[in-house]
Structure formats: C-alpha cells, structure tokens
Image (cartoon, helix red, strand yellow):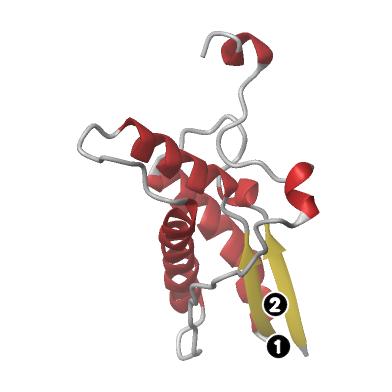
C-alpha cells in the first residue's frame, strides 16, 4: 500500500527550539524512525512544510548587507526543500538499506490575483510572543 505522510515544518523544528542544523537533524531522526517502521511493508511518500526554515533564510537574506535585494521566496523555498529533503533522504537511507529513496524539489504555479492572498492562512518565519514581537 502507498502511504502519504505530511510533515509540518514545525515537526522538524519545534516552537521555541533554536533553528540549529543539529536540532533539526535530531527531529528528523525521530520522525524517520517511525516512518522507517511503516516503510518496511509500505511505499511511503513524504511531503513537508518549511515555514520555520524559510522564515529563517528570509530573515538572514534581508539582513545581509552584501545583497542588493533579498532572495525571493521561491528560491528560499527551493533551498529549504533541498535541505529538508536531504535530511529525510539521508536518515531514511540509513534506516532502510537497499531501499530506493529520492528527494524532489517542487515548483508551484499560482495566480498573482488569487483572492486567497487576501486572507493568508500560513505564515512564514518564527512566531514571537506578544512581548517580544512588540519590541521588534
């Protein structure tokens, strides 16, 4: 049976955790332990969010004095997809020797005039408590 697993970006970087690579690697290790067990008898397709990760890159890009303009979100999204895909593929490869594993970068086409942009439901970046946000 084919099973599709959707991991939110916060599954890979929990609220309040430092966005260090080692922290995200440890979270991916925990997630892939459960996924590897399912993959023993099933074909697995994983999709993942990247809100915290793309937010971190967006802040870094915006603050980089060497850049004339920050990197656009589509490129930052590709960077985070590559990073997260690589982490997942590496840990799954280690847990499932001999299995074929691939990580893919996806592209999404949207209409600039889509009314959904008027009422966003997903936000990019770190979430701050009111006290911290009011000082930024």
Residue 92, position as x, y percentages in the image: 50, 74
Q: Nearer the viewer, residue 94 or 88?
A: 88
Residue 81, position as x, y percentages in the image: 48, 63
For label 2, the residue is 38
- Compared to 83, does 109 lie above or below? below
Which residue occupies 62% across, 34% down?
A: 15
Mark 1: give few (<14), some (14-19) or many (20+) Cα within 10 Å. Answer: few
Give the secondary structure at mark 2.
Answer: helix
Residue 27, position as x, y percentages in the image: 54, 51
Residue 111, position as x, y percentages in the image: 67, 63
The reply to whether residue 120 is visible in this rendering is no
Query: Quarter holding the N terminus?
Result: bottom right
Which residue occupies 65% across, 84% down?
A: 40
Q: Is residue 49 left or right of residue 114?
A: left
Q: Is residue 3 left or right of residue 54?
A: right
* Callout 2–callout 1 Cβ contact below 8 Å: yes
Mark 2: give few (<14), some (14-19) or many (20+) Cα within 10 Å. Answer: few
Which residue occupies 71% across, 56% down?
A: 113
Which residue occupies 49% across, 47% down?
A: 53
- Compared to 100, does 21 lie above or below? above
For label 1, the residue is 41
């Amino acid at each position: 049976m084919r099973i599709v697993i959707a991991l939110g970006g916060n599954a890979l970087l929990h609220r309040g955790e430092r966005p260090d690579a080692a922290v995200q690697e440890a979270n991916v290790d925990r997630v892939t332990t459960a996924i590897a067990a399912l993959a023993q008898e099933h074909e697995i397709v994983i999709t993942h969010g990247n809100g915290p990760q793309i937010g971190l890159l967006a802040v870094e890009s915006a603050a980089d004095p060497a850049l004339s303009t920050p990197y656009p979100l589509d490129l930052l999204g590709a960077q985070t997809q590559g990073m997260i895909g690589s982490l997942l593929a590496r840990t799954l490869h280690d847990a499932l020797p001999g299995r074929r594993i691939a990580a893919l970068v996806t592209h999404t086409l949207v209409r600039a005039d889509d009314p959904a942009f008027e009422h966003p439901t997903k936000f990019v970046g770190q979430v701050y408590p009111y006290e911290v946000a009011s000082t930024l």
